[in-house]
Image (cartoon, rainbow, N blue to C red):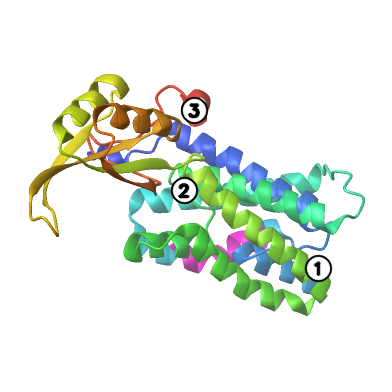
């Protein structure tokens, strides 16, 4: 493969194995023993298990075949390889955790079970998706919609899961379904949290007559890149420059102090931004990323 973005990376595959192991453990050891449903293909496999006694490890593979065909046509070679690997890995762990059960002592507390299932399931799937993979099923649909329509994967998966959860009423009562919905909500939040590395950056727009000085100070003291935009006052029609920069949340108070020292009358707007890409404007937390420490 000539394009580096299409390379199959070992660290990604390791992440898929770890993520699918965590997700499968939650499904086998928390969802099933506590009568909690699941969304997507996994939810359908639980329905088939409840009604016909079919093993989720096998039905996961069988039900994913048509979706993998769709993925092959829309997602490209590396994506489909990653999805196939993730699907096989999930099926293996679903089989493994049934052979080696590790049921936690939750004392039949459905609320605690729902929260734990949401956290562990969302974390497991979030790890997989963070490294560019899926476990098939609704993940493929969500990934396609994200790439084609820019829809957040967590939100899409939550909507797809809700549809399958309604079908799960054929074997669950309404009480356990309500706990399952709590699990699905926690799942979606943890999934998005994991994908975004747990925090958002802060984007500053600074309107000041001393924009150049402020820009220089930001680059010198915070070592963050800046841009200067030409602007015109709507009322005064005066020309001025606007400073744009992206900083770590921990640097917000320092930014306020820095700006105040140079121009106390500066007009400032601050907004959250979950991702900023491009040389000179990339937001990152150097040497602090848990993923970099774990995955190298």
Residue 269 x %, y % = 32, 47
Residue 39: give its label: none
Q: Is residue 173 left or right of residue 231?
A: right
Name the residue beneath numbered marker 3.
295
Left or right relative to 175: residue 6: left
Q: Mark 1 or mark 3, which is nearer to you? A: 1
Give the label, 1 or 2, closer to the camera: 1
Q: Earlier in the sequence, mark 1 or mark 2?
A: 2
Disc 2: which residue: 133
**Most common SS among magenta residues:** helix
Name the N-terminal-most of marks 1 and 3: 1
Mark 2, secondary structure of its residue: loop
Tell me which residue sits at (74%, 61%) in the image: 55
Mark-to-mark CA distance, 1 and 2: 30 Å
Q: Which residues are magenta?
A: 58-68
Q: Quadrant of residue 174?
A: bottom right
197 vs 99, nearest the viewer: 197
Residues at discs 1 and 2 in contact (Cβ within 8 Å)? no
């Amino acid at each position: 493969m000539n394009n580096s973005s299409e390379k199959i990376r070992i660290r990604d595959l390791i992440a898929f194995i770890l993520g699918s192991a965590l997700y499968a453990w939650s499904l086998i050891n928390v969802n099933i023993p506590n009568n909690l449903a699941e969304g997507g293909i996994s939810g359908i496999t639980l329905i088939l298990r409840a009604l016909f006694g079919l093993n989720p490890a096998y039905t996961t593979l069988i039900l994913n075949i048509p979706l993998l065909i769709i993925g092959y046509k829309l997602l490209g070679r590396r994506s489909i390889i990653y999805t196939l690997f993730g699907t096989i890995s999930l099926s293996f762990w679903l089989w493994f955790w049934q052979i080696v059960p590790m049921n936690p002592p939750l004392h039949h507390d459905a609320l605690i079970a729902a929260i734990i299932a949401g956290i562990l399931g969302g974390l497991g799937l979030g790890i997989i998706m963070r490294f560019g993979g899926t476990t098939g099923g609704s993940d493929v649909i969500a990934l396609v919609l994200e790439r084609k329509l820019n829809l957040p994967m967590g939100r899409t998966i939550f909507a797809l899961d809700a549809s399958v959860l309604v079908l799960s009423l054929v074997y669950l009562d309404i009480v356990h379904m309500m706990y399952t919905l709590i699990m699905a909500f926690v799942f979606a939040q943890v999934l998005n949290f994991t994908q975004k590395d747990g925090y958002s950056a802060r984007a500053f727009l600074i309107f000041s007559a001393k924009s150049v000085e402020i820009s220089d100070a930001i680059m010198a003291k915070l070592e963050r890149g800046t841009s200067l935009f030409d602007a015109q006052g709507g009322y005064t029609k005066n020309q001025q420059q606007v400073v744009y920069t992206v900083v770590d949340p921990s640097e917000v108070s320092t930014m306020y102090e820095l700006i105040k020292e140079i121009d106390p009358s500066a007009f400032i707007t601050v907004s959250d931004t979950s991702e900023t890409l491009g040389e000179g404007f990339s937001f990152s937390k150097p040497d602090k990323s848990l993923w970099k420490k774990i995955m190298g």
